Amino acid sequence: MTLIHTLLAFFVALGSLVVVHELGHYLVARWCGVKVLRFSVGMGRVIYSRRFGRDQTEWALSILPLGGYVKMLDAREQDINDMRPEDLKREFTRQSVWRRIAIVAAGPAANFILAILLFAGLYMHGIPEPIAKLRAAASDTVAYQAGLRGGELITAINGEPVHVWSDVRWQLMQPALEKARVRIDVERPAPASGGKLLDTVSIPLASLNAEDLEGDFVAKLGLALARPPAILGKIMDGPAQQAGLQTGDLIQRINGAAVSDGLAFVEKVRASAGQTLKLEGLRGQQPFTADVTPDSVTDNGQTIGRIKVEVPLAPEMALASDPPLTALQKGAKRTWDTSILTFKMIGKMIVGQVSLKNITGPITIADYAGQTARVGLVSYLSFIAFISISLGVMNLLPIPVLDGGHLLYYSLEILTGRPVSERFGEIAQRAGFGILMTLMLVAAFNDIVRLMF
């Protein structure tokens, strides 16, 4: 059932994005007066079709479910010798270069518009996310060296407001690519007064390399989500119960070392299989001590310790919704920023500053589609928005056979005053096809490596 769920989520996402992309081409072509012969979802042999409208456009489903196309009346593909004069006026190549640009650019534009609308809808609905409160950083990280000790709430990065944890990663991504220094505004707890202290710290990102950007580079900097204190939940039959631990106990120290939060407690227990741990803490207002020896268990081929107790680890969450106009503005900004970041990532790949491992194919996309669909509608729609942006950006790349390649041809036509020669177009198409096949092979290889390892 998991495989079926994943495939269904993948084809729903891909199908909707293909339809939106091709619908952009179709609507602008009709608006420009070009005759559309076929609108196909899928590639290859047509397996189902119906004709509608004044032009009897064929709406089709094709056998290969990856991609789609809009087939227009085009002298390069159809014989126009016996064509009626009124149809000749609606032939694609006879349109002005600006109309051809509009038709070709409409597909990627439709993907960007869809992303804006999806993000706007999510911002209006509200997305529950962890707040940007920091966990204590390790002493060998740049966050610790910058003066962050845990408990700080990030309010802005380089002047851009931060509301939730995903904003932190997003605002750090672009400076990380540039290996720049970032300015982080925080609210620090002030125990003496019970209030907050405003502060600004500066963190260098020059230590990050291409491999770091493939993983959780934020954690490498020493920035991590704050977790609840180590307060014990349900006690089950096992070492914790035998040691006399009770629900509600607050663990403050293990073997004399301070326990910063519940995650630190869990990590220490997991790393101490078969070793007796001396716990110190509070039971209500009274201090207590207990000795507990975690059982040794095997988890995914690794020996870990377990004491059979629940420890809440969920971070503090926030849910904020925006009015429609604000949500639309935020959706447009998120789409623009994501597009620019994607172009920069591609540029870094070309010059070798970012690994080609970041290129993903349908297997990885299908996996993410299934995962986000299982998490919930909000996550799934966010995934579709990001994939829609990626599809729009990819199609704008100046590679022949893609929309960006055709836009390059028409730009050259504007500059030179004449269309690109058929011979040049044929050579460029073959080269573009080769580049596209190479990218697909790299993506497939990366997918298989991720699947196996």
Image: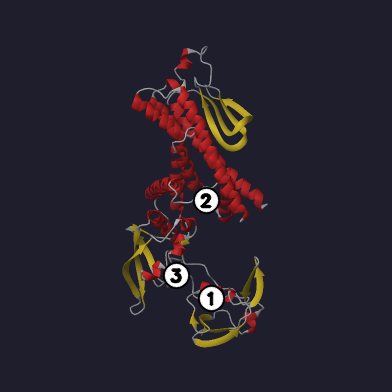
Q: Are marks 2 and 3 in contact (CB under 8 Å)?
A: no
| Residue topped by disc 2 | 357
Q: Quadrant of residue 153?
A: bottom left
| Residue topped by disc 3 | 135
The answer to whether residue 154 of the structure is visible from this angle is: yes
190 with respect to 449 (left or right): left
Label 3 and label 1: CA atoms lie apart by 13 Å
Q: Residue at x 57, y 31 (%)?
A: 40
* Helix, strand or loop under label 3: loop
Label 2 and label 1: CA atoms lie apart by 35 Å
Q: Nearer the viewer, residue 325 or 430?
A: 430
Q: Residue furthest top?
A: 82
Q: Nearer the viewer, mark 2 or mark 1?
A: 2
What mark, if any, has residue 78 been given in the picture? none
Q: Quadrant of residue 58?
A: top right
Q: Tell me the kind of residue under disc 2.
A: Lys
Question: Where residue 427 sits in the image (x, y, percent)?
Answer: 49, 28
Question: Where residue 130 sits in the image (x, y, percent)?
Answer: 46, 63
Q: Residue at x 51, y 15 (%)?
A: 80
Question: Where residue 241 sits in the image (x, y, percent)?
Answer: 63, 81
Q: Residue at x 44, y 17 (%)?
A: 89
Q: Residues within 10 Å of mark 2 (few under 14, many from 20)?
A: some
Q: Nearer the viewer, residue 325 or 155?
A: 155
Q: Nearer the viewer, mark 2 or mark 3?
A: 2
431 with respect to 46 (left or right): left
Q: Earlier in the sequence, mark 2 or mark 3?
A: 3
Q: Earlier in the sequence, mark 3 or mark 1?
A: 3
What mark, if any, has residue 265 been given in the picture? 1
Placement of 248 over or under 363, stated as above or below:
below
The answer to whether residue 370 of the structure is visible from this angle is: no
Q: Tell me the kind of residue under disc 3.
A: Arg
Q: Tell me the kind of residue under disc 1.
A: Phe
